[in-house]
Amino acid sequence: MTDVSDGVLHTLFRSDQGGHEQVVLCQDRATGLKAVIALHSTALGPALGGTRFYPYASEEEAVADALNLARGMSYKNAMAGLDHGGGKAVIIGDPEQIKSEELLLAYGRFVASLGGRYVTACDVGTYVADMDVVARECRWTTGRSPENGGAGDSSVLTSYGVYQGMRAAAQHLWGDPSLRDRKVGVAGVGKVGHHLVEHLRAEGAEVVITDVREDAVRRILDRHPEGVSAVADTEALIRTEGLDIYAPCALGGALDDDTVPVLTAKVVCGAANNQLAHPGVEKDLADRGILYAPDYVVNAGGVIQVADELHGFDFDRCKAKASKIFDTTLAIFARAKEDGIPPAAAADRIAEQRMAEARPVR
C-alpha cells in the first residue's frame, strides 16, 4: 500500500479530523476527469457542498483538501441551521486547460450515482454555467442559472454574510456594529471579495486590497478611485498599519505560524474556507487579542442560497436568513467568553451538538 493510501486511511479512520461517511474516487479517462467526492456527514440531511476545480500538486493534496472541506461543510451547514450534512468535491487539474462540457457531464454522472446523498454547487474554479452543464446529468445540482431554474451566483450572499460577521465582530469588540471609517484589508477580490468591497464602501469603510490577479485589483480600483487602495501581496496587507479587520477571501490556510505574529488587525473575518492552517492557530490568535470570526459561520450565505434553490429559490427569503449570521456570530463570541475558549472552538461545540442531537437513537 502506498504512502498516499496510508495517509488517506489514517485521516478517515484514525484521525480526529476524520469520521467521514464516504469518499468516492472518480475517473473518466476519455475526458481526463479525476475527482474526489467526500461526504463527511448526513446526520442533518443530504450532504451539501461545492465542487472545487483546482490544479493540485498531487492526488494526496486533492484528497486531503476534499476531506477538510467536506468536514467544514458539516459544521457550516449545522451553524447555518440547514437540514443538510457536509460534503465537498474536488476535480483535479487546471480548469483553464482541461475543463470541457464532456468532463463536466461525466462528473455529473458520478454525482448522480450517489442517489441524492450529495448535492453539489459552485466553488473555486467552477461557475454557474458549469453547474448548468452538470445539472444535465444530475438533478442534485444547485448554483444553476436563473434561466435553468437556479439561484445564480451564490457569491452575492456569501459576501453579505461575511459583511454581517464583520458587523457582529465590531459590535462585540467596539460596542458598535458600524464599519464606517474602519480600515479593512481584503485578500482576494474575486467572486466573493469584490462584492464584499462593495458592502464595505457603501458603509464608508476604508478598504485595502490585494490579489494575485492584477486585473481583479484594477477592476476594484477603477470602480472606487477613492476609499480603496492596493498593496503588492498578502504579506504586505497583513502588516498594514492601522488595519482594523483582515478578511482572507482567497484559498485556505491563510492563518498560520508565520502570519499570526505579524497581523496588525484586531479582527479576522473573511470568506475563505479553512483559514486556520492547523489546530492551535485559534489559540494563537486569542493570545494576541485578535478576535476571530469562524470562517464557516460567516461565509455561510452562499450555502444558504443554494440550499434554498432546492425548494424554489426566493432571494429575499435567503437574504433574511443570511442576515441572521450577525446574531449567530454574536452568540458564538458570547459562548466563547462564557466557556473561556476561542470562538472557533465555541462554534465547533455548537455545531457538534446540533449534529449529535440529529442522529436517530438506536
Image: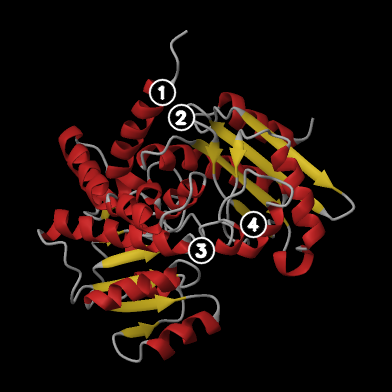
Q: In this figure, which residue is indicated by the disc labeled 1?
A: 358
- The residue at the point 15 percent across, 53 percent down is 172
Q: Secondary structure at mark 3?
A: loop
Q: Which residue is mark 2?
A: 44
Circles 2, 1 touching at the beta carbon (< 8 Å) = yes
Mark closest to the chain's N terminus, 4 or 1: 4
Relative to 191, residue 44 above or below: above
Residue at image point 51% right, 80% down: 216
- Which label number is shown at residue 274? none
Q: How many neighbours does mark 4 have within 10 angstroms: few (below 14), some (14-19), or many (20 or more)?
A: many
Q: Amino acid at mark 1?
A: Ala
Amino acid type, residue under disc 2 in the picture: Leu
Residue 275 versus residue 192: which sits nearer the camera? Answer: 192
Q: Nearer the viewer, residue 195 or 12?
A: 195
Image quarter where the N terminus lies is top right
User: Type of residue at label 4?
Assistant: Met
Q: Is residue 54 above or below residue 13?
A: below
Mark 1, residues whose alpha carbon is within 10 Å: few (<14), some, or many (≥20)? Answer: some
Please rate how many residues cluster around mark 2, counting C-alpha atoms within 10 Å: few if below 14, some from 14 to 19, many from 20: many
Q: Which residue is mark 4?
A: 131
Give, as a three-letter code, the residue at label 3.
Asp
Which residue is the site of mark 3? 153
Left or right of residue 273, residue 350 in this image = left
